[in-house]
């Protein structure tokens, strides 16, 4: 019963989100045709007939009203048809997204996992060693979080990539020497190109994990059962890991599941700074080109991922902490 | 505004290290690929984000370098030379109009083959023209002729009305596709043409979403003369990343905006060429009859603004001193010498004439208020200016102009808006002032600028959506329209010049577009592997790699080092 | 983000007993002092410096030039004084921060506390609204809203940041209120017939204060970073002076390519310092919320024992 209610709730949220995703792009000023004419005008002469031709090409200026468009949009969603991207005309939206998503999942996903694991491990340690010199390092990690991400990223690029030449400046892999595929060369190249962007994400997000875990550890350590375990003479490592950390890590796990949901949204700024061919870049392109279909498709993918992550967390919590079932 | 400028989101810091990269001798694989057929050039066209396959030369979203290097038009019009210069034959050999300009007879080259070995003939040209004409989504010129094959090397193109002025579009930017392949294409407008077969110097070799490689077409008619082996096209995050790559000698050819280019690219084996013109203006919504409101609808106010601009300061702060004086006729002083009437031959003064601006305003009844700003009938001389956010040259220019106007008692408020919002405002006429560029036409003839930006048929009433890159000032004048019709209906340069003098007399007084400065575009190249790019003294074609079919002409001129 | 949808998750504050006045009056620690000094200095800079600096928008023919006596922090591409811009930018950013902080506080309190206290359909509705707000991509929303306003002022940016930023706070407050409303003293107040608004303001709100103030401080950081991010991708309050628009302008002007570090570095540094100061203050608040977070003495005892 509880589960059914939850699912119903999620379906309503999904519908509301999908509807907003439909409306938001349509409220944007301008239209794809004029934006494209603007771009083409800068490349070379544009003849007066172009506007008419583009309207015919994109099917814009059609007489469908908003409601008909909405019905068509929902119908398309049900059949997995997201329409055709104007930016990448005539490529279907689904292909554009499919092409971008592995890059985002790879980069942002991996760095989220690394940041969370590293943060939780360090947080456990910091919580265990509370009240010592370790505590004075904690504020340092929050400074990293207070720095504007792109500023930090650009400075790292400046020192590590440009000055020292340790990392490539931008891109997803070395296009000169390898082609995408399951070759060692390609994978090595992807890792080499992904390291610096991943590093910037980890550096700027690790502080949150560390602090959350540390605080939970400190709280848990003062619980009676931990004191009992210590009194029993169990080894400190065992107390730290199996007694304290095991319980303290629960909120972090939740946070982790949720941030995995947001991975799909990608990191707009990271991808822009490093010219990484992922979802964030595609979204910026879509917005600046009034590409309704692509925006809708991207929003939908992002929304569904976030909702799914939340649903999983909700169900997961229902099992771990029965109190939530009665309260919700 | 440069060809490929992306607003906002750029990786500047990366650029800062360019020098360091150059010093540490970061070597590139691009510069060392030197196969038997010739070097492969690394090219950046200004693309950011992933590439998505589209090799259809008739599609407006086709990838760069497909037009020109794989598919060719019949002739090449050098937009930088004078109109007297004959178009250079590509697939065509020669052409002539009948007396009234309705029938165009074209002789084609013989012995040309497609890259799949099949011969190119007049029926390919006829097929392409008729395909475009009968497919509204492809008919970008709006005036595509009926084509008839006379014999394998002759084709006649028949227009519905006199069309001398359409020739550059039809002959110079219509890319011919092979009939034997395209006749079975059902949806030519959305066809992505994944294995392109063309007549040009290059063919598609490999494609990924971050880069694609073109290699020499061995069947190309002038393959022996072509010294470049291939072209590697990159997607980068923006101009800074590209500038970096240029400085690291990892790019051979680009057409991007580089700030203070004379200083930044002052390195051995790197070069840049100023070319073409982008006349920077303040668009004004000038015509009350079509619904414009605000002080700028008064021609005297527009004249005062033109006089109050300190163009030297704008040039220095916004264009690093690389811009040149602008003509209020919007003709290009050197190229269009034959078409600019002597009385309008001088360009706009580079320094401000505040006294002139003030006396103009006072003569028209404007009175300076206690705040130093003029007013008339309770209306303050204060206007909004729209500018696309991230267009740094425009923004810098406006920062300077705001102060210069203030000296002359004119107030402007600058509003930075997103590009699409700016387009929308211009198209609908819902703006007072807007900084933008005047873009030249397909041939070196001021007709195209006059028609597009001053012709009544290219404007619309305020509130009605019009083309944001045409007559956004809502200028409409019967004398100008009549002169345009005269110029369009003749090939006689003297007759044209007379018609243009009439237009110039009107627009230099009315000033619906307030001339600011002529910002020259530039392209960059590395001479590590090849030489022979167009130079300022030898502008045989536009030097940027994404301008077609100029890119083909440049490519054929490059010499291995 | 971890608060999202977790109605029953045990946040540290869950474990804390209701606050008494004495606990709030504890002696401030070194963190609080350091943090406050950093914040106060920057705030004073923003308040006072604009009175003494040059006109931040005055262009001059010197163009991009390094620090000199006349321009202590150098000039921008159009010869504008960086120090003056920084002073006004500080003012703008702080204004955005405080506005967003307040708006977020109000919105999250409204949706978080009232919904969960009243319960029933209202709670469901408010939860739904918060959840939908959490998953709507905020970037295009910003552009849409911005397109309806001719002049994108910092107030507009603040409004949008608050609109897209309140939902997480509402979730936290909802969880807290849910646990508080069943506490004995709250139940007692309700049984004795106290009015709803009185129960909320007198019994519940004071106990939520530490969580709310922590949220307030956090949303100031969030707002300042958010504004910088929006400006970076070109949709901020482009005409105004803030740290974010300064950074965006420096970047668009390719300041670093031209060697103009003095244009790019200072605004980012100020954001980092201000954020750091606020984080330190937030640490102290966290310790108030959850007294277990400071327990150095206990630690020493445990050390000896283990």
Image (cartoon, helix red, strand yellow):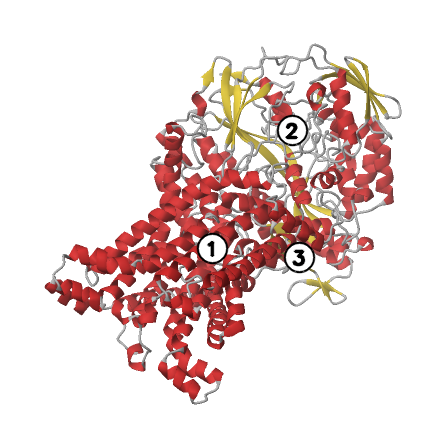
Q: Quadrant of the C terminus of chain C?
A: bottom left
Q: Separation of disc 3 and disc 2 at Cα? A: 42 Å
Label at residue B111 = none
Chain bearing tag 3 is B
Q: Is residue B424 left or right of residue A10?
A: right
Q: Nearer the viewer, mark 3 or mark 2?
A: 2
Q: Are marks 3 and 2 on the same chain?
A: yes
Nearest the eye: A83 or B303? A83
| Residue highlighted by disc 3 | B384
Is residue C212 shown to the viewer in this render? yes
Q: Where is residue B121 in the image (x, y as percent from the top left)?
A: 74, 15
Crowd tier of the residue under label 1, counting other residues whose Cα lies within 10 Å: few below 14, some 14–19, many 20 or above: many
Q: Separation of disc 1 and disc 3 at Cα? A: 26 Å
State whether residue B468 is above or below residue A238: above
Chain bearing tag 1 is C
Q: Which of marks 1 and 2 is in front?
A: 2
Is residue B49 shown to the viewer in this render? no
| Residue highlighted by disc 2 | B56
Q: Where is residue B100 in the image (x, y as percent from the top left)?
A: 89, 26
Nearest the eye: B172 or A112? A112
Q: Which of marks 1 and 3 is in front?
A: 1
Q: In which quarter of the image is the N terminus of chain C?
A: bottom left
Q: Are marks 1 and 3 in contact (CB under 8 Å)?
A: no
Q: In this view, does B366 lie to the left or right of C89?
A: right
State whether residue B206 is above or below residue B283: above
Q: Position of residue B187 (x, y in %)?
A: 70, 31
User: Dot 1 lies on which element?
Assistant: helix
Residue furthest to the bottom in view is C192
User: Dot 2 lies on which element?
Assistant: loop
| Residue highlighted by disc 1 | C228
């Amino acid at each position: 019963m509880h589960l059914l209610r939850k699912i119903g709730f999620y379906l309503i949220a999904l519908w509301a989100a999908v509807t907003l995703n439909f409306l938001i792009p349509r409220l944007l000023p301008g239209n794809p045709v004029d934006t494209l004419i603007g771009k083409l005008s800068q490349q070379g002469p544009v003849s007066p007939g172009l506007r008419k031709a583009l309207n015919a090409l994109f099917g814009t200026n059609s007489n469908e009203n908003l409601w008909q468009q909405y019905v068509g949009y929902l119908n398309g969603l049900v059949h997995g048809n997201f329409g055709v991207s104007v930016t990448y005309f005539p490529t279907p939206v689904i292909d554009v997204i499919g092409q971008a998503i592995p890059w985002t999942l790879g980069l942002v996903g991996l760095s989220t996992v690394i940041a969370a694991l590293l943060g939780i491990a360090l947080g456990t340690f910091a919580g265990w060693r509370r009240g010592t010199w370790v505590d004075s390092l904690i504020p340092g990690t929050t400074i990293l979080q207070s720095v504007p991400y792109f500023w930090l990223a650009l400075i790292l690029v400046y020192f590590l990539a440009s000055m020292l030449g340790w990392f490539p400046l931008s891109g997803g892999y070395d296009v000169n020497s390898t082609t995408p595929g399951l070759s060692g060369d390609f994978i090595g190249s992807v890792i080499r190109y992904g390291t610096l962007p991943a590093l910037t994400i980890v550096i700027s997000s690790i502080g949150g994990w560390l602090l959350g875990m540390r605080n939970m550890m400190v709280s848990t350590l003062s619980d009676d059962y931990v004191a009992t375990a210590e009194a029993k003479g169990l080894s400190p490592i065992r107390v730290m890991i199996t007694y304290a950390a095991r319980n303290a890590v629960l909120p972090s796990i939740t946070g982790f599941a949720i941030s995995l949901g947001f991975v799909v949204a990608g990191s707009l700024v990271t991808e822009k700074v490093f010219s990484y061919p992922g979802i964030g870049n595609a979204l910026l392109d879509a917005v600046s080109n009034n590409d309704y279909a692509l925006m809708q498709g991207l929003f939908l993918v992002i929304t569904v991922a976030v909702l799914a992550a939340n649903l999983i967390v909700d169900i997961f919590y229902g099992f771990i902490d029965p109190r939530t079932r009665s309260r919700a | 505004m440069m060809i490929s400028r992306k607003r906002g989101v750029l990786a500047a810091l990366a650029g800062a290290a360019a020098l360091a990269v150059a010093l540490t001798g970061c070597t590139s694989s691009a510069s060392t690929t030197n196969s038997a057929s010739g070097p492969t050039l690394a090219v950046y066209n200004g693309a950011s984000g992933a590439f998505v396959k589209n090799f259809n030369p008739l599609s407006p979203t086709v990838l760069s370098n497909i037009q020109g290097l794989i598919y060719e038009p019949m002739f090449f019009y050098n937009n930088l030379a004078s109109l007297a210069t004959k178009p250079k034959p590509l697939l065509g050999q020669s052409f002539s109009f009948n007396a009234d300009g309705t029938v165009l007879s074209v002789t084609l080259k013989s012995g040309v083959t497609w890259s799949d070995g099949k011969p190119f003939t007049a029926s390919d040209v006829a097929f392409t023209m008729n395909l475009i004409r009968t497919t509204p989504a492809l008919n970008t010129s709006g005036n595509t002729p009926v084509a008839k094959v006379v014999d394998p090397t002759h084709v006649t193109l028949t227009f519905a009305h006199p069309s001398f002025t359409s020739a550059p579009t039809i002959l110079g930017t219509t890319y011919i596709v092979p009939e034997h392949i395209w006749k079975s294409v059902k949806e030519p407008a959305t066809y992505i043409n994944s294995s392109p077969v063309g007549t040009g110097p290059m063919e598609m070799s490999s494609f990924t979403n971050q880069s694609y490689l073109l290699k020499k077409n061995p069947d190309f008619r002038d393959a022996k003369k072509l010294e470049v082996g291939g072209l590697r096209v990159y997607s980068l995050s923006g101009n800074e990343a590209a500038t970096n790559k240029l400085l690291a000698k990892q790019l051979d050819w680009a057409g991007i905006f580089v700030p203070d280019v004379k200083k930044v690219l002052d390195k051995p084996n790197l070069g840049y060429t100023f070319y073409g013109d982008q006349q920077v203006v303040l668009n004004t919504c000038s015509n009350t009859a079509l619904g414009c409101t605000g002080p700028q609808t008064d021609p005297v106010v527009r004249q005062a603004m033109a006089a109050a601009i300190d163009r030297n300061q704008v040039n220095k702060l916004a264009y690093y001193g690389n811009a040149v004086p602008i003509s209020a006729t919007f003709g290009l002083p050197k190229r269009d010498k034959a078409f600019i009437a002597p009385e309008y031959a001088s360009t706009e003064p580079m320094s401000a004439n505040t006294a002139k601006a003030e006396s103009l305003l006072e003569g028209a009844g404007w009175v300076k208020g206690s705040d130093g700003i003029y007013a008339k009938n309770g209306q303050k001389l204060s206007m909004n200016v729209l500018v696309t956010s991230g267009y740094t040259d425009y923004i810098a220019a406006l920062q300077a102009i705001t102060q210069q106007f203030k000296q002359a008692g004119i107030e402007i408020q600058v509003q930075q808006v997103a590009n699409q919002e700016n387009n929308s405002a211009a198209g609908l006429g819902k703006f007072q002032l807007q900084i933008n560029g005047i873009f030249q036409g397909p041939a070196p003839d001021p007709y195209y600028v006059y028609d597009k930006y001053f012709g009544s048929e290219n404007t619309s009433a305020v509130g009605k959506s019009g083309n944001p890159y045409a007559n956004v000032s809502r200028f409409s004048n019967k004398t100008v329209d009549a002169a345009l019709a005269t110029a369009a209906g003749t090939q006689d340069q003297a007759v044209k010049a007379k018609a243009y003098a009439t237009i110039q007399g009107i627009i230099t007084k009315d000033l619906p577009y307030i001339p600011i400065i002529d910002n020259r575009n530039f392209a960059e190249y590395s001479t590590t592997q090849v030489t022979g790019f167009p130079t300022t003294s030898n502008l045989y074609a536009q030097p940027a790699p994404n301008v077609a079919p100029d890119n083909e002409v440049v490519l054929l001129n490059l010499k291995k080092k | 983000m971890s608060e999202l949808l977790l109605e029953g998750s045990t946040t540290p504050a869950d474990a804390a007993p209701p606050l008494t006045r004495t606990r709030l009056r504890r002696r401030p620690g070194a963190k609080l002092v350091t943090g406050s000094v950093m914040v106060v200095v920057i705030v004073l800079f923003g308040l006072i410096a604009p009175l003494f600096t040059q006109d931040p928008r005055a262009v001059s023919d010197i163009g991009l030039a390094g620090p000199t006596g006349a321009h202590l922090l150098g000039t921008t591409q159009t010869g504008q004084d960086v120090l003056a811009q920084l002073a006004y930018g500080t003012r703008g950013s702080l204004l955005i921060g405080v506005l967003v902080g307040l708006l977020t506080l109000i919105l999250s309190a409204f949706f978080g506390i009232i919904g969960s206290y009243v319960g029933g359909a209202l709670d469901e509705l408010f939860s739904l609204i918060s959840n939908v707000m959490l998953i709507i991509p905020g970037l295009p929303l910003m552009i849409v809203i911005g397109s309806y306003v001719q002049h994108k002022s910092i107030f507009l940016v603040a409004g949008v940041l608050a609109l897209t930023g309140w939902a997480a706070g509402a979730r936290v407050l909802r969880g807290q209120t849910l646990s508080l409303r069943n506490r004995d003293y709250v139940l007692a107040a309700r049984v004795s017939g106290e009015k709803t608004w009185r129960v909320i303001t007198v019994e519940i709100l004071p106990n939520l204060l530490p969580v709310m103030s922590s949220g307030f401080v956090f949303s100031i950081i969030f707002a300042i970073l958010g504004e910088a991010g929006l400006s970076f991708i070109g949709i901020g309050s482009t005409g105004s002076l803030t740290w974010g628009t300064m950074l965006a302008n420096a970047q668009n002007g390719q300041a670093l390519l031209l060697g103009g570090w003095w244009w790019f570095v200072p605004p980012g540094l100020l954001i980092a310092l201000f954020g750091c100061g606020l984080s330190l203050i937030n640490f102290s608040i966290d310790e108030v919320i959850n007294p277990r977070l400071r327990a150095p003495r206990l630690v020493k005892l445990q050390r000896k024992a283990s």
